[in-house]
Image (cartoon, rainbow, N blue to C red):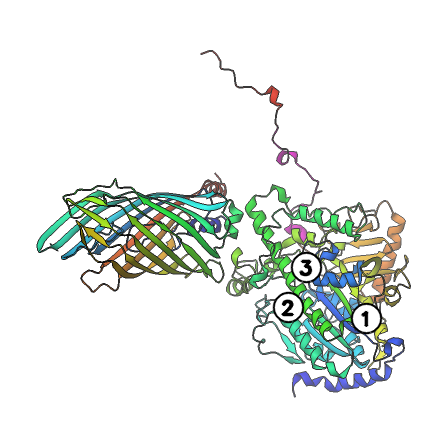
Amino acid sequence: MRRSLAALFFLAFCAVPTLSFAQVPPRFYWKTLGGTNGAPLIYQSLSGNANPLDPAHVVTANANVAFEAEVFIAGYAKMLPLFGRSAMVALLQPMGRIAVDGTIAGLSTSQQTSGFGDPMVEFAINLVGPPPIKNIPDILRYEPGFSLDLIVDVAFPIGEYDEDKFVNLGQNKWYGRLGAPIVWQFGPWVPGRRTTLELLPSLWLFGDNDDFAGVTLETDPMFQVEGHLTRDFTETFWGSLDAVWITGGKSTIDGQSGESLDNLGIGFTAGYPLSESLQLTVGYAASVNDSAPDDLQMDGFKISLVYGWHKIIEGMGRLEDGE
Amino acid sequence: MNPARKGLPIRACRIVVLVAMVLVTSAWADEDRRPNIVILLADDMGFADLGSFGGEIATPNIDALASAGVRFTNFYTHASCSPTRSMLLSGVDTHVNGLGNMDEWTAPNQRGVPGYEGYLSDRVATLPQLLREGGYHTYMTGKWHLGKAPDKIPAARGFERDFSLLDGGGNYWDMTNVVSASPRLVFTEDGRYLKSLPKDYYATRTYTDKMIEFIESNREDGKPFFAYVAHQAPHDPYHLPRKWRNRHVGDYDKGWDAVRQERVARQMELGILPAGTELAERMWFVPDPTVLAPAPRALLGQKMELYAGMVENMDYHIGRLVEYLKKIGEYDNTIFIVFGDNGAEGTDLFKMIAGTPGTRDFLWAAMQWSQTHPKAWGDPGSFVGYGPMWAQVSMTPFSQYKGWLAEGGIRNALIVSGPAATRPAGSINHGFLHVADIMPTLLEIAGVHYPRELDGNPLPPLIGKSWVAMLSGETDSTRNSADWMAWELFGNRAVRQGDWKLRWQWRPYGSGDWELFDLGKDPAERRDLAEEEPGKLVAMVGLWEEYVAANNVILPSRSVFESLEDALPPRFPVEAGYPPLIYKRQFVPPPEMMAEPQEGSP
């Protein structure tokens, strides 16, 4: 029984939010036992014509550049009941290397940077859906049915930033979003047969970067909808078809406005628990309507390992092992 | 020739003989006034499950029949399904009617012996056979379990229309059986063996739909009907449509002891049991639920949630049938008889069959019954039974459960309503009744005489007594204190006379010797009086010997219970609060005597 409990407990931490093109992985807003801790380590390899660590995805006008990023994101998340609802607090810290090559306004450029990006805090609370999971019987009984959460993300502009560089890990601006994740269960909630449609409409808000190569970068609010159709293949192996659509987010650099984004990306994710405490996911996503010069072009692979723990589950394990 | 037709000439001869013998003798014989009869048989439902018998399970439709009719608290079946069904439909003792043992457990020394065929013998007449010849339409839907051969199926034993499961149980949605040797359940419809099941088949719903269809098909001819709805529910596996599974989420986390206490309190309040009734001791190998962690309590409770859903789903479909009868104007002229076929099931049937790795049944289960995750419980590939702890709840306040001759194995809730039951509506009767009484009762109500012979051979006498006088209020009890009934199954034995009960059971459920109980004072069979009442013991054993001689009782040389003592932990008395080590709560000193530790000198 312990194994199945652990598996149930762990599902909600199969992945954590990342700052890549498809922002939040599938099955992220499934709920688990209050007090559960999760520590994600995510590796992403990203390519495109915008800084992948900037959720505004600013596509530079008159440029033909290619960004290449190798990014790790480490973090910590904790589930907790709050006001009688499920809630979660997560902290994510990106780090890694980004290189850019190409021409900007006719000038060749080749830069790279490395270090820490902007940390982000996410707070999520469930508004509609099952009651918070306070104990192991609640885990056994959990089914999302139709659940709706409210999330607030805030990124702190303390990542490494060099105003002389075209590419940076930090964004030198406050940004964040309000979102309403939806998990909609279809059919039975039996491991091996679970199917969900997950949607996350969100509104990104950006502060100004008043030192963007010596000028000011302003970014309009951006609306984003992420979708995942997830399905178990076996009791432990699952997959997801992912999509993200973004619109708005027009950037203005030193008074000169660019184009609003209107982009669609699709991808897939697969997940598998390596152990009762360690979840592996791999995925790929790419923009699809990206032929125009000002369109966002981006693709990337992602591998994540998330370690989850809870004192009750750990204790049960020790008892079972005879310690 | 179609095998199903082979028996027709013989049956035709019987019909001619029976027609000649049937006497329509009473006022009931008036075709305009003879009531319809509906027997609603639940499979493995317990004494205390219905709301009208103290259960918390919502059974409004069955309870409505109880409110309109009479509840009986001293009604006895047999300890397992086919023996009970055989007595219901023949009125004859199991050792005579062919079910001296279940077909599945016929002992070597019983093989080939008349009375132990494992199917309903053709030496007995059946209730539908006689009612049909008496002018009734006879319909059956549901579980038969009294023989599979063409001359043993419902159509050959008196049912004009049928949709029947011939096996003892299995999947509720398809033809998957539990054992690999007989992988497919066998069904008949109107005497033909089914190649497949109807689309959208779900046992409880389909049995109800078919019965309504049968009644409707002949409604215009004005003949009364006998409808035998032998539900598979709530027999395990607990297969249940999803929307019925979550009606009691968390209700049973409190554990079986608490639910039993709640039920017995309601039973006393309702008048089902006398004030001061003591609960039977919890089975010694069943843990005290209060010492269990929340997770196992929730998981074990979920099994009871499913069981409750099974009963509620069955009640819903019973309600559909009742509504249909009201709609066509037949309700007021219909006798309803509702009961469970034996005690609730406390044995893990699935483990018994498929629990040994390496066996073919284990492999079969892995392939066909592999949905073991709690979230899949109730699905077609799952096999959930609720175990001895909840079976004891279903049989509150009695001891033990199905398969045993303790009260928990054979005593069940009975409801009779309709034109023959003119005792005060909603009343409760505590008279000693037996399932074999139903045949003489219904024959009398239908004005049909039980013949002396069948095919020129003498028929065995009916062992039951008609309830007609009791149901009408002429008498208060069908039996007096000298009347007695006896049981034997799997080697377990029992006799009841008045309030006295003699019992012999395999160890460790029994003592392996005769035990004697005074059910009037001790319905939970907690105090063996064999040593205190030697005279009564001898007298009761005398009745047992009389029973053996009269019915050719052959104790089995092998029994399903023969090795149970080796498989179970040693039996010990179950006493609340023992050992104190795990029950005593945290000691809290008087607040005024609490102090911080005194720091010693360095």
| Marks 1/2: CA–CA distance | 25 Å
In the rendered view, tell whether residue B602 sits above or below residue B150. above
Residue B321, by quadrant, is: bottom right
In the rendered structure, which disc, 1 or 3, sits on the residue that comes first in sequence?
1
Upstream in the sequence, badge 2 or badge 3? 2
Return the mark for residue A173: none
* Labelled disc at residue B204: 2
Q: Main secondary structure of the magenta part?
A: loop
Q: Where does residue A166 sit, x and y in percent of width and height?
A: 16, 48
Chain for disc number 3: B
The span shown in magenta is B564-587
Chain ID, mark 1: B
**Do the CB atoms of the residues marked 2 and 3 lie less than 8 Å apart?**
no
x, y (%) of residue B209?
Answer: 65, 73
Chain of the residue where label 2 is placed in the rendered structure? B
Residue that carries the numbered disc 1 in the rendered image: B439
Disc 1 or disc 2, which is closer to the eye? 2
Q: Amino acid at mark 1?
A: Met
Question: Tag 3, which secondary structure?
Answer: loop
